[in-house]
Image: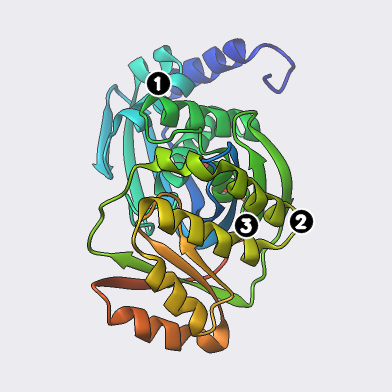
Amino acid sequence: MAPNGSPNRVYEKSVIWNVRRTHMTIKVTSIVHGAISIVNAVASGFGSAMGISLSVKVEINSKKGSGIIFQKGGGTGMIKKIIYDILPSKYLNNNQLLININSEIPSGMGLKSSSAVSNAVALACKYLMNKEINDDFVLNSAIDASLYAKTTITGAYDDSTACYYGGFVTTDNYKRKILKRENSPTDISVVLYLPNNKKRGDVTRLKLLSDIYLEAFQLAYSGQYWKAMTLNGVLTSSLISNSYNITRICLENGALAASISGNGPAIAAVVNEGKVQKIKSILSNLDGRVIVSGTNNQKASAVREVG
């Protein structure tokens, strides 16, 4: 609804008319963080994830004209669908969008880069029209586009909500419902190992052990996140990867938990501060690269500037 209680389409037409009349420029900047898996939702539809401090920043500049120009970051089908779904055609016909997407999150690694980018684009587009944001609208727009682009099997509601809200989330992905959300510890780090070999296994195989994944989910729901994550690592490694030796090495050297994140190939190890350098050093000797991230409990944010 618009601020005066009238339907959104009336308010959006008013915004469009004002933009066209005054030739104003609008700049929106949104920030969304990444996440790692606690329990993979592909197996059962129930999942858990935790926000990390690596982030995506999306900047959209709107000015008189037409067309969408991606100055940095790809104009994928998923991103374009979000834009066309949220912004009215009359607005797009009368305004040119200049879009910059800057991501610290490695893509194609299981670190929820797709969820973070789609959330950030949806949030920026909604802010472009109106500061009154409905979180569910933003999340659903991003998830619908992800399903359309086939970048997810379940809708990745666990990933999307962990990126959007931060902290721990446990979710029913098919019902798009958060069952539990709480802050994660801030005195730990997440050591991420990114192998050079990006090959992934057949993720549908995860369904073979759906009952055990549900047990891992119950651990997460009860607050035993590190046990849940480590069990998830054992299960996922056995079904779609040969990386369990790496997670085992992390655990043997003091990690609180370790697992493939998402469908891989990245491996995430949750580590107390005193163990970070040791585990980072060990993983750095492998064929790949290592990134150290903090946890994140901050909700996605956006700023709208009118000139």
Q: How is the image coloured?
A: rainbow
Give the crowd class for mark 3: few <14, some 14-19, many >=20 residues within 10 Å: some
Q: Which residue is mark 1?
A: 84
Q: Which residue is mark 3?
A: 298
Residue type (three-letter) at the residue carrying disc 1 = Tyr
Q: Is residue 278 above or below residue 156?
A: below
In the rendered view, does 123 fall on the left or right side of 7? left
Q: Position of residue 213 (x, y in %)?
A: 59, 48
| SS class, disc 3 | loop
Q: Position of residue 298 (x, y in %)?
A: 62, 57
For marks 2 and 3, the one nearer the N-term is 2
Residue 133 makes an appearance in the image: no
Q: Nearer the viewer, mark 2 or mark 3?
A: 2
Residue at 57% across, 66% down: 295
Residue at 70 percent across and 60 percent down: it is: 183
Residue 162 versus residue 192 in the image, above or below: above
Residue wearing tag 2: 222
Residue type, mark 2 in image = Ser
Instruction: Give the amino acid at mark 3.
Output: Gln
Q: Position of residue 18 (x, y in %)?
A: 50, 20
Mark 1: secondary structure: helix
Q: CA–CA distance between discs 3 and 1? A: 28 Å
Task: Tell me: residue 58, above or below residue 235.
Answer: above
What's the CA distance linking mark 1 and mark 2? Answer: 40 Å
